[in-house]
Amino acid sequence: MHVIMVKKRLLNGEACPKCAEAEALLRARGLWSRIDEVVWAEEGDPQSRGMKLAVEYGIPLAPFFIVEDEGSGPRTFTSTLLFVKAMLGSEVSGNPSAPATALTAEEILQLALEFEAAPPERTVKWLLERFGSAVAVAFSGAEDVALIDIAVKSGAPFSVFTLDTGRLHPETYRFIEKVRAHFGVTIEMMSPQLEPLQAMVRKKGLFSFYEDGHGECCGIRKLEPLRRALGRQQAWITGQRRDQSPTRADVPVLQRDTHQGLSGPVLKLNPLAAWSLQKVWSYIRANDVPYNALHEQGYVSIGCEPCTRVPRPGEHERAGRWWWEEATKRECGLHT
Ligand code: SF4
């Protein structure tokens, strides 16, 4: 199924009020993600594609919708309400209940190649439509907030979690609250299990990672809560990018993860894999998305307070994480 919405753009560059109302209605009903293509009918330009479609289908007014189904002719809707009714009555594209394990390794590889040049909006939409609400965005409290913005704008249901290690900067906690209020989303705070945490702190104190590496502390404060969070999902969405560090240079847009989800290993979507840090910030500014106040102090990649410093000039952005350890060990295990 391919759905086109034809909207009219007035001479002042704005969408016609009815078109704006129709979009708001679709978003409110969670159906905006069902629009595959928006085509503009430019006021005063009979050659614009939307104007030509209006003539082709004999429809005098925008907005209208063209639904192309395989094997049958196109259907048109001039009433947004009738379109909503038809969409709600039809099967959601993909199969939200299909397990992530239904995709073979070859299919995942093929999709990863296809998605290589695709905008994050498209890959996120694909994942959310395919697995319904059993998809979570992993929010680290840093610049990957762009992912939440993209997921919210898709109109599809999803959940958000963050790993509350108990060692985050105060600015990060405030930022998480800001994001919750800005988007109106629930952010599941995944806390570590009490018993192993208390045992480690009792035995080794609060800063043992400077002595014997971050593995044990990250295992308790991050990895175990992550496993619990993913155990409820078919797939997750991360903000990993190739330009973040040498350890992420080969990150694909889509991959099978080793973490176990609802029906076996989860799928992991890295929609920003090919993005640069500059591109992420262009997105944040262009879309007026909130960001962590620590970025204004020079922090780039932000994790726990004792394990994050501002990178020095010329260093890559994750050089400020676990800086006392070898560069090849600067992953917390979430993505290995
Ligand atoms: S980043 Fe540091 S404080 Fe946070 S969980 Fe890992 S070792 Fe512990």
Image (cartoon, grey):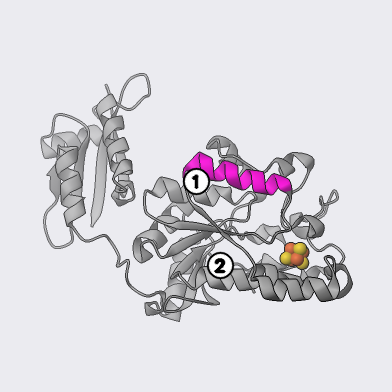
x and y percent of residue 328 in the render?
A: 78, 72
The residue lying toward the viewer, choosing from 71 and 205, is 205
Closer to us: mark 1 or mark 2?
1
Q: Is residue 214 left or right of residue 277?
A: right
Q: Mark 2 Cα within 10 Å, few/some/many (few <14, many 20+)?
A: many
The residue at the point 55 percent across, 76 percent down is: 259
- Mark 2 = which residue? 252
Image quarter where the N terminus lies is bottom left
Q: Earlier in the sequence, mark 1 or mark 2?
A: 1
- Mark 1 = which residue? 149
x and y percent of residue 201 in the render?
A: 79, 71
Q: Quadrant of residue 332?
A: bottom right
The residue at the point 35 percent across, 65 percent down is: 130
Q: Is residue 50 above or below residue 142?
A: above
Q: Is residue 271 above or below residue 267?
A: above
Magenta-colored segment: predominant secondary structure: helix
Q: Would you say residue 215 is visible in this rendering?
A: no
Asked whether mark 1 lies closer than 8 Å to ligand 1, one says no
Q: Is residue 35 left or right of residue 61?
A: right
Image quarter where the C terminus lies is bottom right
Q: Is residue 59 left or right of residue 246?
A: left
